[in-house]
Amino acid sequence: MTDVALETQPIPAIDPSWVDEVLLSGPADQVALVFEAPVTRAELRRMIAAKQSVLAAAGLGPGGSVALCLAPSLAFVTNLLAAWRLGARAALLDHRLTAFEVDNALQRLAPQVVVSAKHVTGGPLRGFVEIEERVATYPGRPADTAHALIQLSSGSTGPSKVIARTAANLVEEIERYVKIGAGVPQAGERIVSLASMVHVLGLVGGLLYGLHAGAQLVVPARMTADGILSTVAAGPEPTTLLGVPFHIELLSSVQAPPSLPQLTGMTTGGELVRAEVYSGFVDRYGIRLGNMYGMTEVGVIATDLFGEHRPSLTPAPGLTVREEAGELLVSLPASPYLGLVDPARWADGWLHTKDAGSVDEATGRVRIHGRRDSQVSVGGLKVDLTEVEHTLAALPGVAGAVVTFDKAIEAYVMLRDGHTAAQLQDRLAERLAGFKRPRVLKVVEQLPRTATGKLVRDRAALLAAAPAPATPAAPQVAIPAQRAGQDVTDGATDPVAPAPVKEGNHSR
């Protein structure tokens, strides 16, 4: 491994001018956001200016660093843009993380200021919440790179990677959406976003692109089928839904959806939608259903926004995708990682996606066949099984642990005398967010190993070692098919995630 070159050079200033030029320009009376009530661009600019004053009073300034741990809300949007407008670097932490995970993340990232929720109103199934923020100083340090955005790849403990993007990287991704053109919402249209703003699809594909393009970003007040459809019906403008496959299955459960002439299509990141779900949704709603593939490290990589080439996708303008030894590689001039650069992830201008796939030489289109490492998707959220396994193995009373994935996260553990599975579940709940915790926990007397002593991760061998019935791991409870209007969670706003789905085409 080698050090990131940027970290050994003088740190250039973070130019905040892009926020006004790329995101906040436009008519003062144009509606930019709808969080239950519409917010015009003039109102948004005033709110951001007020947040700037609060953050500056806490010591945040040009070249500073701040961590945001806020649910999708107007508070999240205004604090993020205020930090960028101050010329500071913002790290985004998922609000569903436990206190243990947040503390680990803050120790790693060492921000100077932390913005979290002091008071929250609204139930867990709300698409957004009203937040009273807590702005606190933290014994951190200024930004040591010129990056504007910091994200963790899969959580705040274990082997997660620190991913960094400059303002120029974000602007380049916005421009890719602009160049894609057809199927991407345009000025005067609406994006009803069901995707979390902490992650790349909701953040750039929804919030940042919508602000740049002059498209309204609307977040439903409730993440139920009826709540989503009511939000679509509330405005006459052409509307695109932005979400993950879970939302498609949720909306497909509506037996007789209302007439929605303004609904022009839906774009999904996350896994490739199963054929039967795809057909059922298109038949029921009569709109285009598109797919998008991307990564936190680079943003949108390839799309098929009209479902014309399913399951293949066309690389986004400005990016080159190639296949090497069955793995997809994406052109990226600089490493997106802070700290040490692993040549197995980025080298010589190529990002190794760790996705198995192929590229059609005649058309250039891409097909994704699945993950090549331990990362899986749970309700559209990415989970690193290694992180889960390391967390389990470190718990008191655990003599060994193996974590696998087969439609759900499963854990096989050896317990020391005097310890129980119930105790293990309670301890795990303190250390991992709900969507990361195993859905199935099996206690075994001995974990199978190879002749060289390595733990076996073959599920059949593990099942043979654990003949006893599975113990459900609270609080993850299987969520059955939903009826229209029935309360459910989208995995983006509530600690209890929906039923997991296998990896495929995705935005992570």
Image: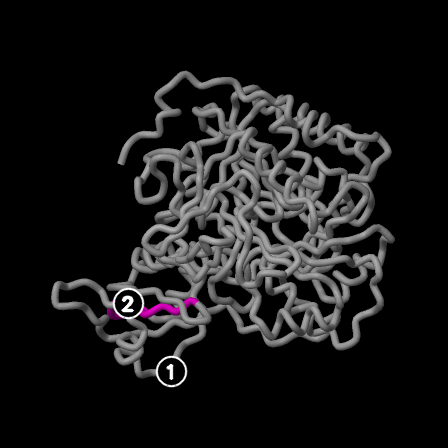
User: Residue 469: which disc?
Assistant: 1
Q: Which residue is mark 2?
A: 457
Query: Is 471 left or right of 434, judged from the image as shown?
Result: left
x then y, percent, for residue 484: 74, 72
Q: Position of residue 483 (x, y in %)?
A: 70, 75
Find the distance from the CA under tag 1 to the CA under tag 2.
19 Å
Query: Magenta stretch: residue 417 in it?
Result: yes
Q: Is residue 49 left or right of residue 406?
A: right
Is 479 displayed left or right of 482 in the figure? left
Secondary structure beneath dot 1 equals loop
Residue in the picture at 53% in, 59% down? 312
State which mark lies toward you, 1 or 2. 2
Image quadrant of residue 280?
Answer: bottom right
The answer to whether residue 201 of the structure is visible from this angle is yes
At 42% from the left and 57% from the top, the residue drawn is: 357
Q: Position of residue 332 (x, y in %)?
A: 44, 37
* Magenta residues, dominant SS class: strand
Q: Is 43 located above or below residue 352 in the figure?
A: above
Q: Residue at x 26, y 78 (%)?
A: 465
What's under tag 2, amino acid-wise?
A: Arg
Residue 48, position as x, y percentages in the image:
71, 30
How crowded pointer 2 is (Cα within 10 Å; few <14, some 14-19, many 20+) is rated as some
